[in-house]
Image: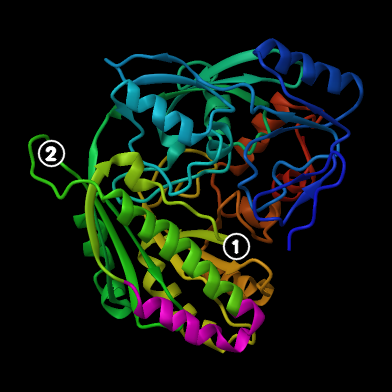
Amino acid sequence: MKQALGPGEWRNWAGTVTATPTRRAQPRTEAEISAAVKDAAAAGLAVRALGSGHSFTPAAATTGLALDLSRWTGVTGADTRTGLVTVRAGTTLRALNAALAEFGLALANLGDIDAQTIAGALATGTHGTGARLGGLATQIEALDLVLADGSLVTCSASVRPDLFAAARVGLGALGVVSAVTLRCVPSFTLAADERPMPVEQVIEEFDALAAANDHFEFYWFPYGRQALVKRNNRVAAGERSAGPMPGWRRFWEFEVMENAAFGTLCRVGRTAPRLIPALNRLSSGALSARSYTDASYRVFVTPRRVRFVESEYAVPRESLPGVLAELRRAVPRLADPVMFPVEVRVAAADDIWLSTAYGRDTAYIAIHQYTGLPYRAYFDLFESVVATVAGRPHWGKMHTLDAARLGSLYPRFEDFRRVRAEADPENRFGNAYLGRVFGPVG
């Protein structure tokens, strides 16, 4: 059972991180953000911006000033001709999706959780899936940041380009992102097809499935024979489609089966771990097919009410079969069984300095364990497997890598460190996690 928060305490969504800031501020304007940063500097306090707490790492934790941006929200500009939309940093993806729909616009790609703030999702490299599409940060056209001295700057590919290159995925290490300008696309409909397939077939046909679909992913249940394959494809104007899922079925599929029923199985497994392999096989065997069409963001996003811990690594796409083969061999031999499925997605190579897809077409492998169950040996095994193929950890999910190891995985890592030192020479926006992954400033 989750313990109550202490006075002034902050906790992330997964319950893996807690912190007690010395100060907390809830600015309503950019001027108030700037003033809060200046006041913290005068008091010798570090500053971290709080999003929705969906990072599994201590990325937002601080004993200094916690800058809560939940009152700094909303779309401030939208050009339906160019698709350029400017949104305040504290706006959640859920609120942004709804606002974009009112303008007849949408994000080209999304992950499956919409509770994150836009700034938090961008800072940690959030992504969806699609072999020809990049992560969320590839949709950024410009960023407004409050720097360590309280000044407000705008950066883009043509204005302060190095700062822009570093800040698109920057973990809040360069300043407080106050607003983001995104390049959006006209609203579109997705045809969703979700069905079980033998896991061996999915792995064998992986490249063909990734190439044939706009968005493709699958879930592998470690003790089962079936994988759940999800294919989402854009519906052309005038094309006949299945139509949205009826409300009653959407409730049954997502709330009852994927959350309430699966949550019950997880709790049973936590009480009696010896039953987990059988429960996992039951989940795999109970998979059923469904097809429907809906607005893109309603297809991308799935309610996640069952709590878990997660680690995710990006690997070169061509290495995926070997990595999965090793995991399929090793995971069933773990002393502590695994309740949650493994999620596999894809993304196109990009040029963002700290993007996990920098310079290479990428497959993402995300492993999970139900909250309260042992996970350390599983996560260590996973890291040892992906290390052999230069796996890069998701910045917002659990991993043990430090600056020495990460520096060898990112060709522009030292460029990022240089820009960080220029933008924040006193490490105003640092914390223990940033110290581990980036090393000292300067």
Image: 91 above or below 245? above
Main secondary-structure element of the magenta-colored stretch: helix
The answer to whether any part of residue 152 appears in the image is: yes
> What residue do we see at 60% from left, 62% from top?
308
Q: Which residue is mark 2?
A: 236
Image: 3 above or below 350? below
The one nearer the camera, 401 or 20, is 20
Horizontal side of 169 relative to 371 (left or right) equals left
Q: Position of residue 112 (x, y in %)?
A: 43, 49
Q: Position of residue 440 (x, y in %)?
A: 79, 42
> What residue do we see at 59% from left, 78% from top?
268
Distance between mark 2 and mark 1 Cα atoms: 37 Å
Question: Magenta residues?
Answer: 269-287
Residue 280 colored magenta? Answer: yes
Q: Quadrant of residue 377?
A: bottom right
The answer to whether any part of residue 365 appears in the image is: no
- Residue farthest right in this picture: 43
Q: Tag 1 or tag 2, which sits nearer the N-term?
A: 2
- The chosen color scheme is rainbow
Horizontal side of 96 relative to 39 (left or right) equals left
Q: Which residue is mark 1?
A: 308
For the image, the number of numbered tags is 2
Q: Position of residue 426 (x, y in %)?
A: 82, 28
